């Protein structure tokens, strides 16, 4: 009798989850953005902000450590995930060192995929034991509200003193920042936005306002699991991190190397920089990020150059804007993405694979990366002038479900650097055009089982395309 009751409860709960976490998201029509002057907002006006492309993962970690070292009043972090490894431990060690100096630190992580587990499981206790650091989770797992499971925080932002802002697609950890890449290493991309004159109209200040909204939002909850009885464990973890930081400095570990005094002057002056983000809502969000890309792509005069880990256009995405990307004869459309061998995300790549013919039929040239590891950067360059770098993937999840953010940068100098970085990966890629629907990758050294499995999954990807 007890077993039957338990099985009945499990069945009822499964049905409840199926309706509220799956079917519910297949029925509603996403909101549509009408014609606006958003392009003017993103490209017009002057800015004193400077920008620095952080293409190399190890260098991006060094810059994070340096900005934390220079902090005097506040540090804010909003991240999807903190991955394991020495680099993440050293970032936390630098944060605690700043907190010891009196810097106020706020950390917001995704409530499900934050990854403060395993070797990082004592970090919440260490934070709870320090008066100058706070930790909150965006949309923690709620078993009775399955519809909230899709509302994920996908931003990757670090802010220091309204002076520095680092934003892009890179999480923190060895997977993204190690000097000697681990097996699961991914190539990603960030931008440092530098506000040298402490301008109150800076993009960094706008990013701070967004973090303030996230921090104070009802969806964001304080960390609850670090208990008072774990205070001693938290202090022990603080001491261990402090020792790790001290040893790294004594041994001249390059990850914590003090950068030259005027290191930030290597940044570029741009014509305009603006911060862009998705709304903070549940269910279907207004598709602001997608709308911006479509509108800019339609205005292109010479070239639209994309880099995405995968691309999964859906019918809902096409319906969400009043215009679609209309290929122009004189405009070149290119996309750099992963190949079937390089992708670390089989489900997402299966969705891309099922959409590949549709993408090629638009006139898009696709370059599938065949080099070591995989690519994770999300960027575009339009007409060698307008650039975007952020966390936004070209899929329904980034369009309607996740929090996402990016910076749009106007100026030929930064666009040239970003184009060169993308070209370096494109040089090690297989090229596909509209006539290559059945063409296979030139690299057949990967797992044949992986290729067959993903190809088979692509036939079923319609089941989860709305959630990737």
Image: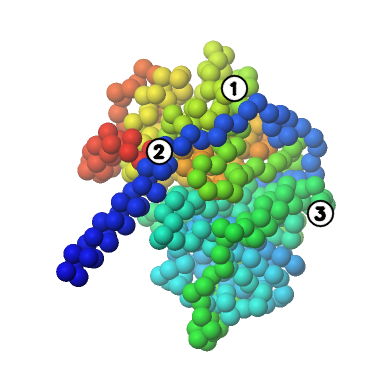
Residue 285 in the image: x percent, y percent?
55, 42
Q: Spatial distance from mark 2 to mark 3, Cα to Cα? A: 46 Å
Sequence-earlier tag: 2 or 3? 2
Q: Nearer the viewer, residue 357 or 1?
A: 1
Q: Is residue 271 above or below residue 48?
A: above
Q: Residue sitting at 26 percent across and 43 percent down? A: 450
The quarter of the displayed image where residue 242 is located: bottom right
Q: Nearer the viewer, residue 259 or 145?
A: 145
Report which residue position mark 1 lands on: 298
Crowding at mark 1 (Cα within 10 Å: few <14, some 14-19, many 20+) = some
Q: Residue sitting at 57 percent across and 38 percent down? A: 286
Please tell me the numbered disc located at residue 42: none
Report which residue position mark 3 lands on: 198
Sequence-earlier tag: 1 or 3? 3
Q: Is residue 143 left or right of residue 419?
A: left
Which residue is the extreme one toward the left? 1
| Labels 1, 3: front one | 1
Q: Nearer the viewer, residue 63 or 349?
A: 349
């Amino acid at each position: 009798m007890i077993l039957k009751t338990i099985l009945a409860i499990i069945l009822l709960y499964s049905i409840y989850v199926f309706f509220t976490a799956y079917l519910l998201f297949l029925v509603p029509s996403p909101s549509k953005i009408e014609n606006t002057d958003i392009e003017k907002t993103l490209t017009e006006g002057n800015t004193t902000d400077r920008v620095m492309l952080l293409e190399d993962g190890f260098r991006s970690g060094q810059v994070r450590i340096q900005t934390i070292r220079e902090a005097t009043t506040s540090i804010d972090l909003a991240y999807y995930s903190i991955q394991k490894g020495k680099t993440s431990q050293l970032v936390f060690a630098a944060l605690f060192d700043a907190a010891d100096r009196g810097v106020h630190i706020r950390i917001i992580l995704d409530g499900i995929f934050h990854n403060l587990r395993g070797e990082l499981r004592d970090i919440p206790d260490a934070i709870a034991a320090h008066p100058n650091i706070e930790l909150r989770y965006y949309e923690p797992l709620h078993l009775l509200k399955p519809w909230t499971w899709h509302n994920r925080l996908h931003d990757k932002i670090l802010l220091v003193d309204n002076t520095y802002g680092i934003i892009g697609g890179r999480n923190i950890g060895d997977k993204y920042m190690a000097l000697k890449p681990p097996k699961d290493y991914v190539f990603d991309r960030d931008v440092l936005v530098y506000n040298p004159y402490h301008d109150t109209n800076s993009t960094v200040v706008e990013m701070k306002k967004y973090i303030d909204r996230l921090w104070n939002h009802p969806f964001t909850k304080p960390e609850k699991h670090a208990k008072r009885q774990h205070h001693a464990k938290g202090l022990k973890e603080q001491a261990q991190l402090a020792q790790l930081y001290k040893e790294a400095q004594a041994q001249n570990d390059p990850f914590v190397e003090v950068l030259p005094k005027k290191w930030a002057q290597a940044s570029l002056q741009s014509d305009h920089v603006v911060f862009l983000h998705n709304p903070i809502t549940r269910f279907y969000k207004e598709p602001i990020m997608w709308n911006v890309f479509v509108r800019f792509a339609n205005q292109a005069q010479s070239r639209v150059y994309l880099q995405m880990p995968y691309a999964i256009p859906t019918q809902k995405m096409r319906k969400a804007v009043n215009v679609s990307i209309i290929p122009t004869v004189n405009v070149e459309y290119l996309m750099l993405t992963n190949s079937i061998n390089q992708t670390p995300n089989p489900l997402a790549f299966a969705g891309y694979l099922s959409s590949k013919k549709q993408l090629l039929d638009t006139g898009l040239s696709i370059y599938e990366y065949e080099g070591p590891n995989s690519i994770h950067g999300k960027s575009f360059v339009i007409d060698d002038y307008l650039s975007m770098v952020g966390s936004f993937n070209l899929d329904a999840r980034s369009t309607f479900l996740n929090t996402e953010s990016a910076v749009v940068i106007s100026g030929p100098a930064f666009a040239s650097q970003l184009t060169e970085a993308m070209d370096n990966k494109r040089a090690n890629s297989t090229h596909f055009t509209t006539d290559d629907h059945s063409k296979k990758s030139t690299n057949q050294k990967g797992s044949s089982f992986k290729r067959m499995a993903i190809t088979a999954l692509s036939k079923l990807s319609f089941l989860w395309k709305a959630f990737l």
